Amino acid sequence: MEDKVSLLAKTLTPSPIQQLSLLAQRCNAINLAEGFPDFPAPSHIKDAAIAAINSDFNQYRMKQMHGLDVDPLTDIAICCGQSEAFAATMFAIINPGDEVILFDPSYETYETCIKMAGGVPVYVSLDPPHWNLGRDKLMMSFTLRTKAIVLNSPHNPTGKVFTEDELEIIAGACRARDCLAVTDEVYELITYDNEEHISLASLPEMQNRTIITSSLSKTFSVTGWRIGWAIAPACFASAIRNIHIKVTDSAPAPFQEAALVALTSPPEYFESLRKDYESKRDYIVELLLRVGFQLHMKPKGSFFVFAELPESCILSDIEFVEELIKQAGVVAVPGCGFFHTNQSSDEFSQAAFSYQKKYIRFAFCKSDATLYSAAQKLGQLCDAEGPLKLMYSGECTAH
Ligand SMILES: Cc1ncc(COP(=O)(O)O)c(C=O)c1O
């Protein structure tokens, strides 16, 4: 029966990350890999969801949110998380062969959604170690088929917040090439060191060509509630809504009610969210430096650290994570899964992109107890002088 599986589905094979997840489960490893908080959601939001369920908010619903000047009746599509909002956006804007520009490294699901919608992802690599955006590189990636550019800021996996200059470069390119922007702003309220998130849509002449996607998942630690949205000019919002209705019909109604309460939380909630994450960030940054990782920048947003392997380390990122699971009982994500520009087999580009096998992503959206246990376990692998030394013990048993 396998021949009945579509060609598209066959291209969606498990990534090394999924294989390592299996190994991590078997070893009962501490999970610093996935970006879901392991602590409770805020009680005022849970209470709102329970109240909505008890009041029988059980039917299909759409609701309003966000700060820009938008018409809630025409410019918003509520979806099942940012993930569905993004996928529906791709189906709403892509014709076969249209190109969509992505930055490299990037969150993995964008590429799949673009391809499923018949589009072609075109990658522009950000320059390590600070992941700066080069104007010329970006401009050279445009062709007559370019339909849109995707911007995720604050950025997964690097924790970068795109600077005002970089936003202006992207906006300028969109205006000059009459191209759309699709933003993923799920970490918009998780920024550090007084860094403020700026939505690309707020730059001059950008709101009418930007589709903002975001969700409740990260800001309110409710990744399983599946409430997200797209905010866009009416023609796109209605196309996205039509696709959403055909695929899922509605986002969960009681959680939409709770979303209203969540989004009108008092400023103290958002302040303490940032503060709590900032202290977790400082803790993990200090830990990773102590055990020998190279960090060229502290994350300015999101809840990830993208750490370069210790200089003396001869393992690849995948080998390193495999050993981390087996020897320390801690799992993180090998960075290679976030890179896409190194697809060529020629030696020159292999060498130029060799940095892509040297990064590990650690998620710090975890309780202090989890982070402390991970610190203990990593510490045990260091000798008195540090840094952490891992030898490769063989092929990953999860393969
Ligand atoms: C950059 C980014 N966008 C979107 C998502 C998924 O968001 P949602 O739960 O709203 O689908 C994640 C989750 O890890 C993410 O890191």
Image (spheres, grey):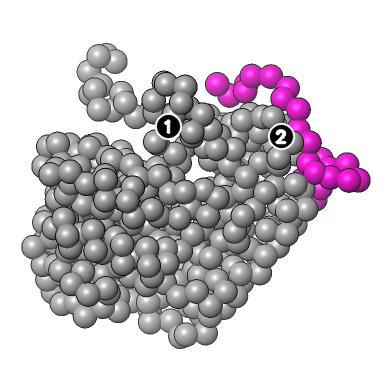
Find out whether the residues at labels 2 and 1 contact each other: C-beta distance under 8 Å.
no
Beta carbon of the mark 1 residue lies under 8 A of ligand 1: no
Residue visible at 73% across and 53% down?
A: 289
Nearer the observer, 189 or 329: 189
Q: Is residue 72 left or right of residue 391?
A: left
Q: Is residue 277 above or below residue 157?
A: below
> Magenta span: helix, strand or loop, mainly?
loop
Residue visible at 66% across and 29% down?
A: 315
Report crowding for label 1: few under 14, some 14 to 19, many 20 or more residues within 10 A (C-alpha): some
Magenta-span inclusion, residue 321: no
Find residue 242 and report its image quarter.
Answer: bottom left
Magenta stretch bounds: 376-399
**Residue 164 x, y percent position in the rendering:** 38, 70
Q: Amino acid at mark 2?
A: Cys
Q: Amino acid at mark 1?
A: Asn
Element type at mark 1: loop
Mark 2 → mark 1, Cα distance in angstroms: 21 Å
The residue wearing badge 1 is 342
Q: In which quadrant will I find the C terminus?
A: top right
Residue visible at 22% across and 75% down?
A: 204
Element type at mark 2: loop
**Residue 290 x, y percent position in the rendering:** 78, 53
Most distant residue in the front direction: 136
Residue visible at 59% across and 38% down?
A: 358
Find residue 176 and report its image quarter.
Answer: bottom left
Nearer the observer, 323 or 37: 323
**Residue 313, label in figure:** 2
Labels in figure, total: 2
